[in-house]
Every structure is written in C-alpha cells, then in structure tokens.
Image: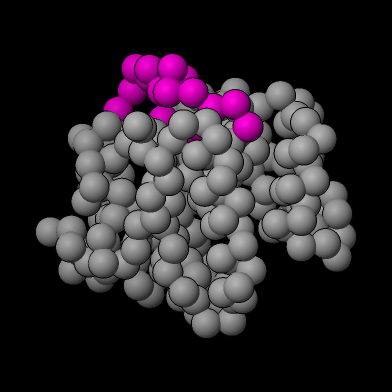
Amino acid sequence: MPIVYSYYNPVPGIDHGGEAALIIEWQKSWRACDFLPVMLTHQHADAHPRAADFLKVVENFPSSNPKGYDLSCWMRWLAFAQVGGGLMTDYDVIARCFSTEFLALPDHVTVLDRGGVPCAVYATPEGAQSIVDDIILRACPPAGATHYSDMYFHQAMGYPKAPDLTSPYGAPGWENAPAVHFSHFDCARENPGRKRPAIIREAMQVV
C-alpha cells in the first residue's frame, strides 16, 4: 500500500483537539483512496544527519504566527528527507479521488498545488534531500521582513508543479480536484465561523 505522509508537532496556542479532528479527516480520506497515512514527528526530523545545521538556519527566521508554528513547518522537510521522500501533504489536504498513477512524475521534486504552496509535495529520496540542502544553503528572509515561511521559500525556489492534483478549497474547479486543501484562510473566507472538520465533511459529501 502506498504511503502518504504528514507532519505534526504540538504548538502552544493552537488547539490540539481541533488539529486532531483534522488529522482524523485526513486519515479517513487517504485510506479511502488506498493510501496508508503516516504521521511524521519531530523525532523523525531530529534523526536526520543534518538536523543541527538545519536548525541553526531556520530557528531564528521571523514569524507572525504562534511561537513554534513556522519552525514546525520548516522541520517537516527534515522528517520528509529522513524517511526517503514520497508523498507528503498537510493534514488539511483531503483526498477525493487520488491515485498512485498521478505520481508518475518526471522531476525529483514536484509541488502538487496550483499556487506553489507546499501543502502537497512529491519527491524522490534525492529530491527530498535536495529540499533540505536548498533550505540550508538558500533560505534567507528579505531584509526587514517580519515573516518568512517555508511557503515563501518554496515559491521562490520555483520547484516544478503538477497543478491539477491539489486545489485550494473554494477555487474554481475545486470540486473536481483529486485532493483539496482546506486551509484555515480559505475555510474562513468560504464559511465564516465554522470549524474546518465540519466544513470538510460537508464539502466532501457534496462533491
């Protein structure tokens, strides 16, 4: 059975119960598409041989999010490389009709989101390690920046994309995408005041 990875590390100030509910929806959706969902943690990241060098680079990047959130986003790339790459998504990326056939991709790193957001990435072992190496060597916030995330880094790097595989929720044609990214921002815009797990359950039943 093919594996889909995600990454979770508890962050102070973010509701752990709410995150757990999202993880359940993520697991159910990918199992229904015959993938084995596996959650990576800081233990995978810490086990990477370049973890110390990596942490020195990313730990002081400016962030406007709750303390530890963006650091967790950076560290997932270490964990991803440590397990040899493959398919990794955020746990708010919900599979609708995703197949391993979609992953016959020509590049070592492919971002599966049409906007270049690294919410879903497929990488060979070499590609996953190259992301770590690129971050160590090239990640650098612009002068005076108050926020710098791994999303900005990925978009600046311009990794190849397979834009038809993952759609932001609410974007044109999202109902037909193999996987849908139910980001906090998009869910709040489309359904103000509602919790994301409830939005996901309703939206995926409709489509």
Quarter of the image with the N terminus in it: top left
165 versus 144 height, above or below: above
Residue at the spot x=78%, y=52% of the render? 199
In percent of width and height, residue 181 lies at: 63, 43
Residue at the spot x=30%, y=44% of the render? 131
In this view, the residue farthest toward the left is: 49
In percent of width and height, residue 170 lies at: 79, 39
Quarter of the image with the C terminus in it: top right
58 versus 97 height, above or below: below
Question: Which residues fall within the magenta stretch?
Answer: 96-117
On the question of residue 135 being in view, the answer is no
In percent of width and height, residue 167 lies at: 65, 34
Residue at the spot x=35%, y=57% of the render? 40
Foreground residue among 98 and 52: 98
Q: Is residue 169 left or right of residue 47?
A: right
On the question of residue 112 being in view, the answer is yes
Q: Quadrant of residue 123?
A: top left
Foreground residue among 180 and 59: 180
Residue at the spot x=44%, y=63% of the render? 8
In this view, the residue farthest toward the bottom is: 12
Q: Is residue 88 left or right of residue 136?
A: right
Magenta residue check for 106: yes
152 versus 111 height, above or below: below
Foreground residue among 114 and 9: 9
Magenta residue check for 136: no
Q: Is residue 94 left or right of residue 8?
A: right
